[in-house]
Amino acid sequence: MKKCVTLALGLLGPAAAFAQATPIVPPPVVPADTSYWRTSLKAGINLNEAIVSDNWKGGGATSVGLSTLFNGQAHFLRGPQTWDNEADLLYAGQYTRGQGYRKTNDRLWLDTKYGRRFAKKWDVFASLNMLSQLSRGYDYSGEEPRLVSSFLAPAYLTNAYGVEYRPSSRFTLRLSPFAPRLTIVRGLSRFQTLPTDQVYGVSPDRWTRWEVLAAQLLATLDQPLGSAANLKARYLLFTNYGMFRLRQVNQRLDVTITAKVYGLLSVNFQSTVLYQFDQDANIQFSQGLGLGLLLTRQRPVAGAR
């Protein structure tokens, strides 16, 4: 009996020792498949200044200006399905001796869209976008500054449905015969001269306005200009079927050109042309030119059309 026990221990001992010496290797962690995504990031800051002494006979005033821009995009493509997202922000201001600080530019654009391809270069889609500004804006043409805008005053929230033409990853054209839009004016009474005044098309007893039967056209272009420059343009057209007249068709064009000089140093030009009849009867225009730092990051997706 003792011989049997001894023999069993002799056979099992090396196996147990081998089992203890051999580590248990966990199964490999498979990373999430992100090859369907194409992302890009662009962030910049620009500074301009002018220093003039108090006894400078040529005239002028000391001023310091600062502008920032941010554009982030994430595009998903898998088979016939697409999901495109974009955040586009711009803010600029300037301090001038004797006048104080004044905002010179402001834009907040958020957009998300789901599409499904039904033919080469054509999708059906549903989208949601918002256009507003980040901070308060004033009209300085009178004796005293007058508040004319602020965050969510106004803001335009549009839910669009239609077809999209995508000949390449650089250009898209959305045609939306049905694009309900909600106009928001937060704190409407702040902008009224008289209690009966409409503000950005919103009635005095409300803070929102619905335009259900409406159409929208949105065209975007993201075009490289050589190896170190880029042109980005966005054209937006919106019309209400109930007020379908040429002078009541809202249109907006945003153009941004960025060019790297050396390393992170860059030059950028931004311009906006706007016609919106419930804001002003005339065309509005703004532009800015700056020198500063620009950070760009991009991760392309394999098989992007």
Image (cartoon, rainbow, N blue to C red):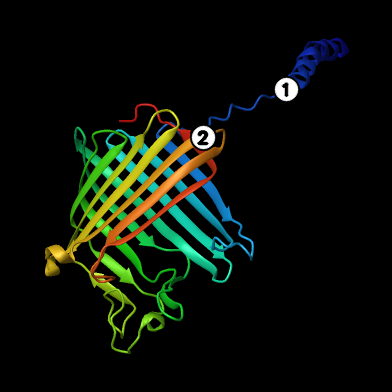
Above/below status of 181 relative to 263: below
At which x and y percent is residue 6? Answer: 86, 12
Above/below status of 254 relative to 229: below
Mark identifier at residue 267: none
Q: Nearer the viewer, residue 72 or 279?
A: 279
Q: Is residue 31 left or right of residue 14?
A: left
Residue behind mark 1:
23
Judged from the image, the secondary structure of the residue bearing numbered disc 2 is strand
Looking at the rendered structure, the kind of residue marked 2 is: Val
Whether residue 213 can be seen here: no
Q: Nearer the viewer, residue 43 or 8?
A: 43
* Residue visible at 56% across and 37% down in the picture: 264
- The residues tagged by marks 1 and 2 sit, at their Cα atoms, a distance apart of 55 Å
Whether residue 278 can be seen here: yes
Residue behind mark 2:
261
Q: Nearer the viewer, residue 188 or 84?
A: 188
At which x and y percent is residue 134? Answer: 46, 64
* Disc nearer the start of the sequence (1/2): 1
At which x and y percent is residue 301? Answer: 40, 30
* Residue visible at 51% across and 54% down in the picture: 67
Q: Quadrant of the C terminus?
A: top left
Judged from the image, the secondary structure of the residue bearing numbered disc 1 is loop
Q: Is residue 58 left or right of residue 195?
A: right
Q: Nearer the viewer, residue 110 or 252?
A: 252
Q: Quadrant of the N terminus?
A: top right
* Residue visible at 36% across and 74% down in the picture: 185
* Residue visible at 37% across and 52% down in the picture: 271
Q: Is residue 83 left or right of residue 72?
A: left
Looking at the rendered structure, the kind of residue marked 1 is: Pro
